[in-house]
Image: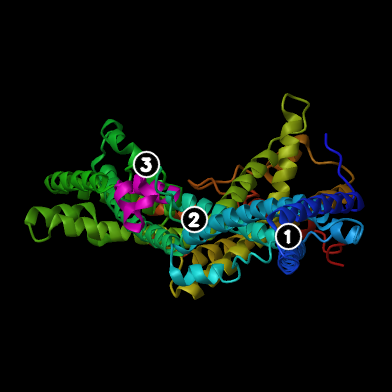
Amino acid sequence: MLEIESPTSLCFRSNTTCNALLRELQKIWVDIGESDAEKDRMLMELEMECLQIYRRKVDEAANSKAKLHQSIVSIEAEIASLMAALGALNIHSPIKAEKGSKSLKEKLAAVTPLVEDLRLQKDERMKQFVDIKAQIEKMSGEISGYSDKLNKAMLGSLTLDEQDLTLRKLNEYQTHLRSLQKEKSDRLNKVLDYVNEVHSLCGVLGVDFGQTVSEVHPSLHRTDHEQSTNISDDTLDGLQHMIQKLKTERRVRFQKLKDVMGSLFELWNLMDTPQEERVKFERVSFVVRSSESDITEPNILSTETIEQVSAEVDCFNKLKSSRMNELVMKRRSELENLCRLTHIEPDTSTSLEKSTALIDSGLVDPSELLANIEVHINKIKEEAHSRKEIIDRIDRWLSACEEENWLEEYNQDETRYSAGRGGHVNLKHAERARITVNKIPSMVDNLIKKTLLWEDETQKSFLYDGVRLVSILEDYKLTRKQQEEEKKRYRDQKKMQDLLLKRRESIYGSRPSPRRINSVKKDALVPPTPRRNSAGATNTDIMTPRSYSSHRQNGFFKEVRRLSPAPLNFVSIPKEDSASTYNSVYGSEPDSALYN
């Protein structure tokens, strides 16, 4: 390893060498015979050449120093720029840290690794920005549908600046990218939901799904994965419009199928179609009874299904025309049965006799007659619905009358208090019956009010089997009042007879013969069993709607419109016997207490 010489030793050795060469040159000049002037000139030229060489070397060293200094300054500027671009404010330059303590080359060697590291960081940061920006541009294009106007609006605030590569700027890009990713995910989920709904509707309607969604955008029904699903606003709007269109078509077809199935149901019921023939349309029948939004079965609302049901209806219509007479008779019987159950008088214009005569004469089309009967049936059903509350009250009233009848029979049973089997059950039944019977007057009054209110609302009379219900109720109240008065007279008469017997015992001091007493008791205290009408009413001549119906069925209903209450035959004492008893006790004793 060579040792580096100091400048002083190098200069001394250089001078020694020059002096030796100069002596050798002078010796040569002497040998040659050069003049002193020539020697001086040549020495002067030699000195000038040496100075030029030194000056050139000094200039070269100065230029090298300047270049080194300029390089250091440039590198410092680049470091400052990189640090500013990267936002690396916590990195300190080694040149400023040890300023003046090192040579330029040492300074340059110390700063070069830092600048190379910062350059690598910038390149890496730049790649991140470029990658994120590419993703943002791609997602923005997918969301905007690659519309230049919308794309520029979404990317207007994201211009890549190489002088601003800080982490804050990178976070802004990442935040924007995440927001676009979320929006893309939301849009993609919405598109998938719309596509699934379209698929369900197409399945119900029997429509080609691929062709339907391709009308909105081809990417919605792709066969490969090269083209991404379009999630632009136009696609979403197109899917919404297509869903509304399919729902409208579903609504129209559902109503059409419902109408056709309604006609088929009527024909089935009309023709008494067996269940075996209805099974093939059981699936359609179940769907029609459900709501429109609940229909999910494939092809249930397809045109083929509706055409099949329509063809079945046409077939039954042809069959119906051949059995029209039988159908008219059947529907008329149903009308009469419905009127009987609802206690409404049927229309006589379509009676069985008249209907048969009109059909046989050919004056009326059987289908028109059947339609007329159907109108009457619907009318009866509507009226029965409005009369339901009053009919229910009538049933409760009749039930109370039956309880009253049972209570009357129970009270006449002399063994009712015996400890026989079921006695306690009858006692409880009697208590409940008394409570119910006590409510009958209020039940009748409320029923009259309800009936009058119904008549005011409907502007017609409430007829019960052809008789105005209010008239029936008023007659019932009147008859009940008369019978209450008759019972009161009976109780007064019984008290009078008891008083006569006591007065007789007090006057004559003896009791009448047992035979006479038994005769009186038998005649006065044990009433005969009251006569009851066919409806089983409580009192003898009280007329209820059932008794009116019974009279009407026996053929003399119109003649009993006016009730004729007969006095109750609770006391079976002949008039002559009462008078003779009275005269025998009081007639011969004018001074008795009865006259006083």
- Residue behind mark 1: 86
Residue name at image x 36 percent, y 47 percent = 221
In this figure, which residue is indicated by the disc labeled 2? Answer: 545
Horizontal and vertical percent position of residue 71: 73, 62
Is 142 on the left-hand or right-hand side of 282? right
Foreground mark, 2 or 1, reads 1
What residue type is disc 2 on?
Pro
Q: Secondary structure at mark 3?
A: loop
Q: Secondary structure at mark 2?
A: helix
Circle 3 sits on which residue? 224
Residue at x 26% of width, y 44% of height:
305
Q: Which residue occupies the foreground of this view, 525 or 104?
A: 104
Most common SS among magenta residues: helix
- Please state the extent of the stretch shown in magenta in the rendering: 196-222
Check contact, mark 1 vs mark 3: CB within 8 A. no
Q: Earlier in the sequence, mark 2 or mark 3?
A: 3
Tell me which amino acid carries mark 3: Asp
Residue at the spot 90% in from the left edge and 49% down from the top edge: 9
Cα gap from disc 1 to disc 3, whole angstroms: 43 Å
* 131 and 576: which is toward the camera: 131
